[in-house]
């Protein structure tokens, strides 16, 4: 029997890999394990996250009812309000449109949406 597929890592595109790694590393408490102009990576509990530079990259609109659904990260937290405040201190923004009441959608410093969800 063939082994199941496993998640090796997640890669996010953007304009500044080192800045993205710094933001998510601080948010998750993970270490930057690789950083250069074109690519950076953080690692901690779970699959590592890589960040690649894409020339001319633009943030996905939020919300975008006319566009195709893109992926986003769901991160679990013990204290939702404290986690939102910490993410904002690190440079995230909270968009006006919130599709639910139990979690919060935020935008990272380059515009990727992500959710903070109660554990």
Image (spheres, rainbow, N blue to C red):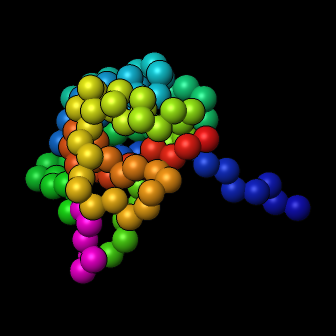
For image coordinates 26% across by 66% down, the residue present is 63
Q: Residue at x 14, y 49 (%)?
A: 55
Q: Is residue 21 visible?
A: no
Where does the magenta region start and end?
62-67
Residue 113 in view: yes
Q: For residue 60: magenta? A: no
Above-or-below relation of 36 to 98 = above
**Rendering coords of residue 119 (x, y %):** 61, 41
- Farthest bottom residue in view: 66
Please state the horizontal and vertical placement of residue 97, each as a whole percent of the image.
27, 61
Residue 70 image point, x, y percent: 37, 65
For the point 11% across and 53% down, which residue is it?
56
Along the viewing direction, whichever of 111 and 56 lies nearer the viewer:
111
| In the image: residue 107, left or right of residue 10 | left
Q: Position of residue 22 (x, y in %)?
A: 31, 25
Quadrant housing the N terminus? bottom right
> Which residue, as the protein is rendered here, is positioned at the far left?
56
Compared to 87, does 101 lie above or below?
Answer: below
- Is residue 20 found left or right of 80 in the rendered image? left
Q: Main secondary structure of the magenta part?
A: loop
Q: Residue at x 23, y 32 (%)?
A: 91
Judge by depth and name the residue closer to the eye, 74 or 13: 74
Q: Is residue 22 above or below residue 66?
A: above
């Amino acid at each position: 029997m063939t082994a199941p597929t496993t998640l090796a890592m997640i890669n996010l595109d953007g304009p500044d890999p080192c800045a993205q790694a710094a933001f998510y590393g601080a948010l998750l408490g993970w270490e930057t394990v690789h950083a250069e102009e074109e690519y950076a990576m953080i690692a901690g509990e779970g699959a590592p996250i890589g960040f690649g530079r894409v020339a001319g990259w633009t943030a996905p609109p939020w919300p975008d009812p006319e566009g195709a659904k893109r992926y986003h990260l769901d991160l679990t937290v013990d204290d939702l309000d404290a986690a939102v405040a910490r993410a904002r201190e690190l440079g995230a923004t909270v968009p006006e449109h919130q599709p639910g009441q139990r979690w919060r959608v935020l935008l990272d410093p380059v515009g990727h949406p992500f959710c903070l969800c109660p554990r």
